[in-house]
Image (cartoon, rainbow, N blue to C red):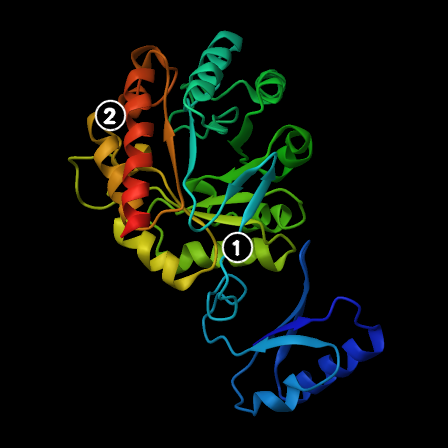
Amino acid sequence: MIIQLEKEISAKTKEEIVRKVSDLKYKITDVKTQKGDYLVGIGKQEFDIRDVGHMPGISDIHIVSDDYKLVSRKWKVNPTTIDLGDGVFIEEGGMAIMAGPCSIEGEEQIDKTINHLKENDVKIMRGGVYKPRSSPYSFRGMGIKGLKLWYKAARSAGIKIITEVMQVSQIEEMLPYVDIFQVGARNTQNFNLLDELGLVDKPVLIKRGISGTINELLSSAEYVFSAGNENLMLCERGIRTYEKASRNTMDINAITILKEKSHLPVIADPSHGIGIRDHVEPVALACIMAGADGVIYETHEKPEEAYSDGQQTLNFRESKKLIDRMRKVFDLRESM
């Protein structure tokens, strides 16, 4: 059960609601976010929802059977909109494009990428400054120094930043310089990290785990929401299967299923989804037709010289072509 409380509810009125629900043998969790106050009740006893719903101080009440409750579309029919400021939104009915290199490498690379994005009217730049690599000997990012360098250039150009946070200790130092925190596939079930991101008033994009299920992704988002942050996005980035012809298997099914199950925006990552440069474009277009609210992909002036993931990274010419085609496919989808 989810109870949405009125904004000006008194402590006494709230206590009466909690007592009423507790008498029904429901365990109550108090959730306060930047957008509202909620009581989440977990229990099995059947009752007449009107017995609780009529009480003073309650704005709305829903019975939600899913394990993930706050991110479920069963209680929040209207989709969540992420407002990044300066007229940049990530929302249902929109087409957010996030592009940039796998890794931030230096000032020249940052400037060239920002110029490419501005030329193509892309408002959000992706890039990694802390990189979780399979080998400890691979390039692992420029760290906070690289993020500050990136932030300075991006801010002057009006570009928003999305980048991965890997551990709790990085959140505070990164906070002033990011617009969206990304939780990577390896950290989707890092519950300490998810809890801490719930305390941050910045949007969070959560990628599906390497072999994670759809329900596990939704449960990870529930951790962040229940800790206090409802500015969330879900990202399908492919899963590891028995197939060896591609880096991962892009689960396009997940996009339409997530849209049905949750009110959160759904973003597709075709670069990691297939991991082969020549196939990124068709996969991206398929994801848009499946209902994705945005696409995040990798681009670099010279992918063959990129510090990481060059094999799945588009050069700027290929990136421009993809942007143009994504917008055409999005217009087609919306006209149907």
**Quadrant location, the N terminus:** bottom right
Q: Is residue 239 visible?
A: no
**In this figure, which residue is indicated by the disc labeled 2?**
277
Q: Earlier in the sequence, mark 2 or mark 1?
A: 1
> x, y (%) of residue 193?
58, 45
Toward the viewer: 194 or 156? 156
**In this figure, which residue is indicated by the disc labeled 1?**
80
Can you say whether 283 is above or below 208 in the image? above
Q: Real-space Cα distance between discs 2 and 1? A: 32 Å
Q: Could you tell me which residue is drawn at 68 percent across and 61 percent down? A: 36
- Please tell me in which quadrant of the rendered image residue 43 appears: bottom right
* Residue type beneath disc 1: Thr
* Residue type beneath disc 2: Arg
**Element marked by disc 1:** loop
> x, y (%) of residue 155?
62, 22
Q: Could you tell me which residue is drawn at 43 percent across and 41 percent down? A: 186
